[in-house]
Image (cartoon, helix red, strand yellow):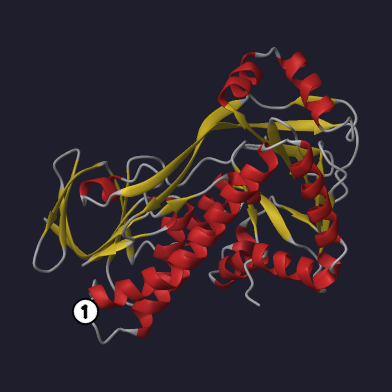
Amino acid sequence: MREFDVIIVGGGMVGLAFALELSVRQNISIAIVDPGEINPTIHKSFHTRVSAITPVSEAFLGGLGVWERISRRKSFNATKVWDQNSHGQLNFNASDESLDHLGSIVENDLIQAALFTSLDRGKIDCIKGSLTALDKTEEGYQVTLSDQTKLACQLLIGADGAQSQVRKLSGIDTCEKDYQQQAIIANIACEKSFDGAIWQRFLADSIIALLPLSDKQASIVWSCKNPLASELTDMQNADFCRALCAAVEYRFGEITLESDRKAFPLIERSANDYVLPNLALIGDAAHNIHPLAGQGVNLGFADAQELNMQLYTHTDKALGDHMVLRKYARARRTDNELMAKTMTGLNWIYKENNEGLRWLRGFGMNLIDETPLLKSFLQKHALGKQG
């Protein structure tokens, strides 16, 4: 049986980022366990899974020497929101906060590959395998993989996503809210430029986000109720493009698909416990939210930073000390749940379409747009800043 100080289950963006920072901060043995390929092959065409990376996350990745390794990324300097059923609109601009940009749209695979390339393989072992069993020991945990390999550690990290095996096998329950919606994702090309902005349109029956990959290419996230999602998924490509053009008021001219369409269910999920003795959950294993604001991976990176900070601050304590892990959980749960509830509230506000609420919604959007202090507060929160 091989023994490590820390075992991280999950070699996605958050798990790799946590491992990299931990290896830089502390001289300990680390294993990353994942059943898939944690060093993805990068293709010339854009991947459909992308993230909106905030300046705070950019700085985090830059500090790890990762950001400069990402060769394909598209910065945006504005976020423009408009509502079908009211006169409301919101415009956030980098210049309002004296920034040169608000963030960057980056393919998840490129971030993951850059993180993998940055790992010191002398300090970190990457082990391919699926987790099948967990056993609590006096020192920490023993894990069993699908090929019956057994590993032991003082601290076990669950960074294995929304369907986390670490969470399930450790007996941590979740609170869940099924939105009865799906997100349809695809890559598109347009006739007209996106002008360096993320665009969001709130419709009576759905929400569309257009995340620019280049001047005239974008990744779309079309969040809609299950019946409409099925209808849109079953459409011929030409019909889907026409529906999308109409949904965004032909603002970008003719639209063509550059990828297959994929759909996945939208479920808000929060682990009842982020930590147990010798065990911590980070990223989507601990929480996942509606994709309305594109904040998912940024919250995960913040988890990784906070947990690393607590471990580094308390090196006098044993790895996996429950009190240290609980400090991480307390620090992160408030922010994560505030973001989750905000997204749930916004989703409810925009899916309700009685006349009075439509008027109030438009009034509220315009009030925010015309109130610099309030708009700045909301923008700083979205950027991952405090205060």
Residue lying at the far front of the rendered structure: 356
Three-letter amino acid code at the position of disc 1: Ala
The answer to which of 197 and 66 lies nearer the viewer is 197
As drawn, 142 above or below 376? above
Horizontal side, residue 262 vs residue 194: left or right = left
**Residue drawn at the location 56% of the way across and 31% of the way down:** 182
Q: Is residue 301 visible?
A: no
As drawn, 175 above or below 3? above
Q: Position of residue 362 (x, y in %)?
A: 82, 48
Q: Is residue 161 visible?
A: yes
Residue lying at the far left of the rendered structure: 138
As drawn, 118 above or below 347? below
The answer to which of 360 and 18 lies nearer the viewer is 360
Callout 1: 10 Å neighbours few (<14), some, many (20+)? some
Q: Position of residue 286 (x, y in %)?
A: 39, 55
The residue under label 1 is 318
Tell me the quarter of the picture where residue 358 sits.
top right
The answer to which of 241 and 73 lies nearer the viewer is 241
**Residue drawn at the location 59% of the way across and 40% of the way down:** 49
Q: Position of residue 88 (x, y in %)?
A: 84, 48
Secondary-structure class at tag 1: loop
**Residue drawn at the location 15% of the way across and 46% of the way down:** 149
**Residue drawn at the location 85% of the way across and 55% of the way down:** 366
Horizontal side, residue 363 vs residue 267: left or right = right
Q: Position of residue 278 (x, y in %)?
A: 22, 66
Tell me the quarter of the picture where residue 219 sits.
top right
Residue lying at the far bottom of the rendered structure: 316
Q: Locate the N terminus and report the quarter of the image it occupies.
A: bottom left
Q: Locate the C terminus and report the quarter of the image it occupies.
A: bottom right
